[in-house]
Amino acid sequence: MKGQQIYQQVAFLGLRLSTLIIISVLGLIIWFLGKRGVSALSWEFLTQAPRNGMTEGGIFPALIGTLCLTLGAIIFALPLGVFAAIYLTEYAKQGRLVRIIRLGINNLAGVPSVVFGLFGLAMFVEYLRFGSSILSGSLTLGILILPTIIRASEEALLAIPQTFREASLALGASRWHTIYKAVLPAASPGILTGAILGIGRAAGETAPIIFTAACFYTPRLPHSIFDQVMALPFHLYVLATEGTHFEKTLPLQYGTALVLLGLVLGINLIAVVIRTRLRRKMRW
Amino acid sequence: MANNTKIVVENLNFYYGNDKALKDVSMLIQENKITALIGPSGCGKSTFLRVLNRMNDLIHGTRLEGKVLIDGHDIYSNTTDVVELRKRVGMVFQKSNPFPKSIFDNVAYGSRAHGIRDKTRLTNIVEESLKKAALWDEVKDKLKQPAMDLSGGQQQRLCIARALAINPEIILMDEPASALDPISTAKIEELIRILKEKYTIVIVTHNMQQAARVSDYTGFFLLGELIEFSDTNKIFTSPQDRRTEEYITGRFG
């Protein structure tokens, strides 16, 4: 008996330790960035364009650029991903074909982001002649986050009890109506989780946008989806590696990182709030 | 009131893959009467019920031989629209399954699925259905609240209201009170008795006393066969088949 008790204590200690380590890592990152970058943060920083060889001014155009690219990626990937998940779980006959498709999606999730960038360059920038633009970047990022959204949506749909579908069909509703009005709303919190993960990734990826959308500097904000944009991760990369005034821009780099982090956390927070309210309304 | 035959089942054989779940079942179900199906677990009565609104179509590998006619029309013919069929044949399940939506949206779900958008019409349908299901007084002030907040008995009555709202002709009930306490069960049985004036009801129950209390006709299933089918009174007072008698007197099942 005593042996079991000790064993349990050790196991729980291990679990607590793991949780602590994970939270500490997050805390460390925020603290590290904060200490070095908080000095650069100001209203000016957020609302003005960089000046003087990037050593002064702000990151406003990069902020706008990242917002555009992330929004574009989600607009492309979310409907497509959700419909793909609906097809795979509700309509397709579960057999070899579906297994192969799922294998393909899982492999897509493992493709390195720089390879996506290259694909985007070849496909959207050059072959389809969209050029380096918000459009190319959004599409590339969209494909990048597609597997995440499909997987999360599939899980969410599969978790819906069959009795909901049965109840709906027994009332004389069509299969599509059943999915659209009974299953999908109940699955929306889970789907939203996938969207959250996707947004976070799309906002922060650097390699895909280097080839397809981002530019070092542009004097004005984008006017159309065919324009190039500045973007936060790329801006950070540029400042840290190619900037001519590395020392002077150090705080700006950390500041950029903080803003990027803050942006992603902010969007996540909004999505989590929405999801919590949905969950409360739709508990089962 | 003259007896009209609403549903005709002729030589029904039903297969789950290679497993023959229903063997040569024939039955006539009368309009505006309550027909109860009894039998031990696994005897096929739920399968039979689900044949009547083609809910078994949802399961892979099922096969059917024989005829099932509702108002003279074969519901398994190629020309049958299953969605239309299920508008006429409603179902209440064993475990209540309200949608994770508001009470109003639950009852209005079927009507909305059939294209009714007008708010006034929907409100009237919801109120009428909840009244028919003897639930209106308990929920009239909280129609926008989640249906999941209701008690088990209330949820089941909600499901009955939801089924009534689409105005079916036939209502199939699969052990509707088996998960409920005695008081809720009594309420539902009372409800079923009132409903038969307007609807044809087929109810599966493992509770023999319930079948005796509530139904006009009773069918006894055993291992996929319909052993006996007749007036409820006759079956319980003088069953013809020895197996029926043994089941009713509690020898098995």
Image (spheres, coloured by chain):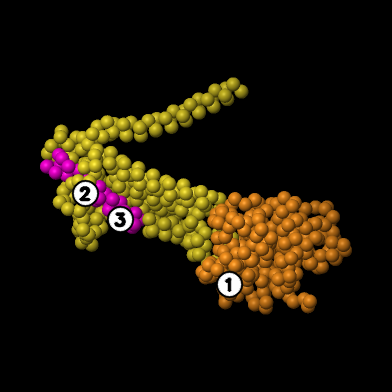
Amino acid identity at mark 1: Glu
- Which numbered tag is attached to residue A72? 3
Q: Do labels 3 and 2 share a chain?
A: yes
Local SS, label 3: helix
Where is mark 1, residue-wise? Answer: B84
Indicate the quadrant where residue B168 lies. Answer: bottom right
- Which numbered tag is attached to residue A61? 2
Please state the horizontal and vertical placement of residue B55, each as a whole percent of the image. Answer: 61, 64
Q: Which residues lie in the magenta part?
A: A50-77
Disc 1 is attached to a residue of which chain?
A: B
Can you tell which chain is drawn yellow? A
Disc 3 is attached to a residue of which chain?
A: A
Residue at 84% over, 55% down? B249
Residue at 48% over, 61% down? A180
Local SS, label 2: helix
Could you tell whether B123 is left or right of B180 in the image?
left
Q: Which of B69 and B173 is in front in this view?
A: B173
- Cα–Cα span, label 3 and label 2: 16 Å
Disc 2 is attached to a residue of which chain?
A: A
User: Colour in which chain B is shown?
Assistant: orange
**Magenta span: chief secondary structure:** helix
Amino acid identity at mark 3: Gly
The residue sitting at the right extreme is B238
Q: Which of A7 and B192 is in front in this view?
A: B192
